[in-house]
Image (tube, rainbow, N blue to C red):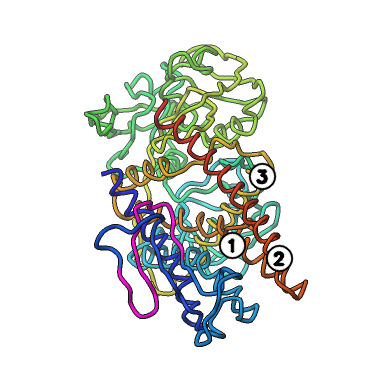
C-alpha cells in the first residue's frame, strides 16, 4: 500500500505540472510531440497517439515531460511545421510555456485550500477566552468573554483575524473595539515583541497581547494544607463546577465569585477530581465530589486558600532537568530569573527563549518553605512520525490545566471566506518554502532534511492513515515544493530554461551547441548530486535506522 499511496500522492502532481506545459504549448500553437507521465518505456496498454501527440505512462514514476518541437535546436523542422517550434515563438510565450508547469503546481494548493475552507461551515469566533495576567491585554483592561469587533479599523469576525493582525504589530499600539455585556468599548493595547524560533531555526518577530481563545477551567491549587480549602479536603487540580449552586466552570467566574465575598459564610463546593487516564485514548476520568468550605476572615478579607492551578505542577517526568532540580507534583512555581510568573504559557515561552542558558527558578512546596534551584534545558533529538529528526529542549514539568473553547459560529459569506483563507494560507506556505530553500543554501538547515522517493512514500502512507483532508493538505505542501524547486535557475529545470531564454535574448542569438551541452551537463550534474544526497538520506533514515 505504501507504493499505492506514493503514486496517489505524486502522480497527480506530476500530471498537473506537465499539464501546465502542455496547455500553454497548445495555446500558443506549439507542436507537442510527446506527453509522458514517468520516465523510461511505456507501460503496456498505457500508450497511445491522439492527433499529433503521443501519450504514455512510463514505468519510472519520478517525474514526467512534455516534448515539444524545436526543443532540440539541431532537429530538422518540416515546412508544414514552420512557426510551430518552441524556438520560433516570442520570448514572452516561451517564458509562459516553461513556467506554466511550476505555476500550475503553485495554483493547485490554492484550489485545495479553497475547497477545504469552503467545506467548513463554522469557525472559531473572535471571543477572548483567557487573558494572561501581567500581559498587555490585561494591562489594557481586556477580559475573558470580550468579543473583538475591530482592530485599527479592520472588521474582525473570526479568531484567525485577531491573531493575524496582532502578530504583525509588535510594539505598535492598536485600538480594539470590543463588545462586553451588550456594550461597545474601545481599548488601546500594545502587543509586546516576542522572538519566536521557527523549525527552520529562523528567529521571527511577532506581536503578542497575552490572550487565548480557550477559557481556563476553574481548576484550583492549594499551597497551604491548613487553609480553609486544605482543611475541607480540596486538592490541587480539582475542578470547581459550582459554589452554593452558582455555576463556576471557568476560572474568571470562580475568581469573580470569591472576590465579591463579604463575609465568611459556609460555601458548598461541587467539584470534579481527576483520576488516572483510562485506556489507550488517554481520556481523563473525573470523579465528582462535594465539600463544605468554611472561609477565614483575615484583616477584613475573606480568605479561602483557593488559587488558580495555573502555576502548580501537575506532573514531573523522572530523569529530567525539572526532576533533578527538585520540582514535584503539587509545587507552586513563583519566579524564573527573578520574573514573577502568572501563567504557565509565559513560563514555557521564557524557557524556550533561554533554552541554552542556566536559569534560576523559585517555587514552594505545599506547606513547605521556598526553594531555589538552577536548571538548564536538556537537548534531545527525536524522530517524528514522518521519520524526520528534530531537536527538542526538555524541561520535564507540566501543568495539566483544562481549557474549553467557545462554540464555533456559522461562517458568513463562505465563498469569500474560502478565497481569503486560501490566499492567506498559500502565501504563508510559499513564504516558508522560499525561506527554507534559502536557509538550506546558507547552511542554516542541515542537508539531511532533504529527502527523496522513500521519504515521499513514507509521508504518503502516514498522511493517508490520518484521512483524506490531511492527505490533500500534504499534497498541497509538496505541490508548492515541487513548483518552487522547478523555478530555480538550474539548467534542465524549468527555471534553467528561463535563464537560457534570457541569455539568448540579451545576446540576440541562440547559444552554441557546445554551450548548450555544457550547460545541460552542469544542470544534470547538480541534479544527480541532489538525487544522490536525497537517496543517501532516505537509506539512512528509513532503511538503516
Q: Is residue 219 left or right of residue 128?
A: left
- N-term mark: 3 or 2: 3
Distance of mark 3 from mark 2, alpha carbons?
Answer: 30 Å
Q: Closer to the camera, 366 or 122?
A: 122
Does residue 382 show up? yes
* On screen, residue 353 above or below 496: above
Q: Are the residues tagged 2 and 1 within 8 Å (C-beta)?
A: no
> Alpha-carbon neighbours of circle 2 within 10 Å: few (<14), some, or many (≥20)?
few
- N-term mark: 1 or 3: 1
Reading the image, the residue beneath label 1 is: 176
Q: Secondary structure at mark 2?
A: loop
Q: Closer to the camera, 85 or 179?
A: 85
Q: Secondary structure at mark 1?
A: strand
Q: Main secondary structure of the magenta part?
A: strand
Where is residue 434 shown, x and y percent of the image? 60, 54
Residue at point 56%, 32% (across, down) = 347
Reading the image, the residue beneath label 3 is: 441
Where is residue 50 shown, x and y percent of the image? 33, 77
Reading the image, the residue beneath label 2 is: 512
The stretch of residues the image draws in magenta is: 48-65
Amino acid at each position: 500500500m505504501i507504493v499505492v499511496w506514493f503514486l496517489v500522492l505524486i502522480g497527480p502532481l506530476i500530471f498537473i505540472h506537465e499539464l501546465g506545459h502542455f496547455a500553454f504549448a497548445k495555446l500558443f500553437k506549439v507542436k507537442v510531440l510527446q506527453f509522458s507521465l514517468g520516465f523510461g518505456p511505456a507501460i503496456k496498454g498505457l500508450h497511445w497517439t491522439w492527433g499529433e501527440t503521443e501519450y504514455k505512462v512510463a514505468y519510472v514514476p519520478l517525474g514526467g515531460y512534455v516534448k515539444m518541437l524545436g526543443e532540440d535546436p539541431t532537429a530538422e523542422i518540416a515546412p508544414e511545421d514552420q512557426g510551430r517550434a518552441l524556438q520560433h515563438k516570442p520570448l514572452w510565450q516561451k517564458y509562459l510555456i516553461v513556467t506554466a508547469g511550476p505555476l500550475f503546481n503553485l495554483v493547485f494548493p490554492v484550489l485545495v485550500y479553497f475547497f477545504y475552507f469552503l467545506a467548513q461551515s463554522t469557525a472559531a469566533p473572535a471571543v477572548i477566552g483567557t487573558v494572561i495576567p501581567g500581559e498587555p491585554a490585561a494591562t489594557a483592561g481586556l477580559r475573558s468573554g470580550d468579543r473583538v469587533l475591530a482592530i485599527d479599523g479592520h472588521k474582525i469576525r473570526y479568531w484567525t483575524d485577531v491573531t493575524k493582525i496582532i502578530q504583525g504589530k509588535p510594539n505598535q499600539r492598536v485600538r480594539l473595539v470590543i463588545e462586553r455585556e451588550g456594550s461597545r468599548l474601545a481599548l488601546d493595547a500594545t502587543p509586546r515583541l516576542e522572538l519566536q524560533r521557527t523549525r527552520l531555526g529562523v528567529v521571527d518577530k511577532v506581536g503578542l497581547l497575552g490572550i487565548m481563545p480557550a477559557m481556563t477551567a476553574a481548576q484550583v491549587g492549594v499551597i497551604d494544607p491548613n487553609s480553609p480549602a486544605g482543611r475541607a479536603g480540596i486538592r490541587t487540580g480539582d475542578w470547581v463546577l459550582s459554589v452554593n449552586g452558582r455555576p463556576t466552570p471557568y476560572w474568571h467566574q470562580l475568581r469573580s465569585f470569591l472576590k465579591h465575598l463579604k463575609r465568611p459564610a459556609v460555601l458548598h463546593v461541587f467539584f470534579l477530581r481527576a483520576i488516572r487516564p483510562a485506556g489507550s485514548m488517554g481520556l481523563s476520568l473525573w470523579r465528582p465530589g462535594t465539600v463544605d468550605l468554611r472561609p477565614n476572615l483575615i484583616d477584613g478579607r475573606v480568605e479561602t486558600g483557593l488559587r488558580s492551578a495555573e502555576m502548580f505542577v501537575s506532573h514531573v517526568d523522572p530523569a529530567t532537568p525539572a526532576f533533578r532540580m527538585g520540582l514535584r507534583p503539587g509545587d507552586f512555581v513563583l519566579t524564573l530569573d527573578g520574573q514573577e510568573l502568572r501563567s504557565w504559557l509565559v513560563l514555557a515561552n521564557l524557557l524556550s527563549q533561554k533554552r541554552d542558558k542556566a536559569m534560576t527558578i523559585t517555587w514552594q512546596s505545599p506547606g513547605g518553605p521556598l526553594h531555589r534551584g538552577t536548571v538548564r534545558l536538556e537537548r534531545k533529538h527525536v524522530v517524528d512520525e514522518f521519520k524526520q529528526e528534530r531537536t527538542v529542549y526538555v524541561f520535564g514539568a507540566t501543568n495539566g490545566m483544562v481549557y474549553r473553547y467557545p462554540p464555533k459560529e456559522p461562517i458568513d459569506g463562505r465563498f469569500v471566506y474560502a478565497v481569503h483563507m486560501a490566499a492567506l494560507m498559500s502565501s504563508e506556505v510559499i513564504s516558508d518554502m522560499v525561506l527554507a530553500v534559502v536557509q538550506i543554501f546558507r547552511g542554516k538547515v542541515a542537508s539531511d532534511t532533504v529527502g527523496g522517493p522513500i521519504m515521499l512514500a513514507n509521508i504518503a502512507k502516514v498522511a493517508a492513515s490520518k484521512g483524506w483532508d490531511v492527505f490533500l493538505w500534504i499534497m498541497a505542501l509538496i505541490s508548492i515544493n515541487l513548483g518552487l524547486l522547478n523555478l530555480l535557475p538550474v539548467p534542465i529545470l524549468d527555471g534553467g530554461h528561463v535563464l537560457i531564454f534570457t541569455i539568448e535574448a540579451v545576446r540576440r542569438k541562440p547559444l552554441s551547441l557546445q554551450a548548450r551541452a555544457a550547460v545541460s551537463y552542469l544542470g544534470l550534474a547538480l541534479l544527480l548530486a541532489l538525487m544522490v544526497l536525497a537517496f543517501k538520506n532516505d537509506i539512512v533514515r528509513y532503511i538503516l535506522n
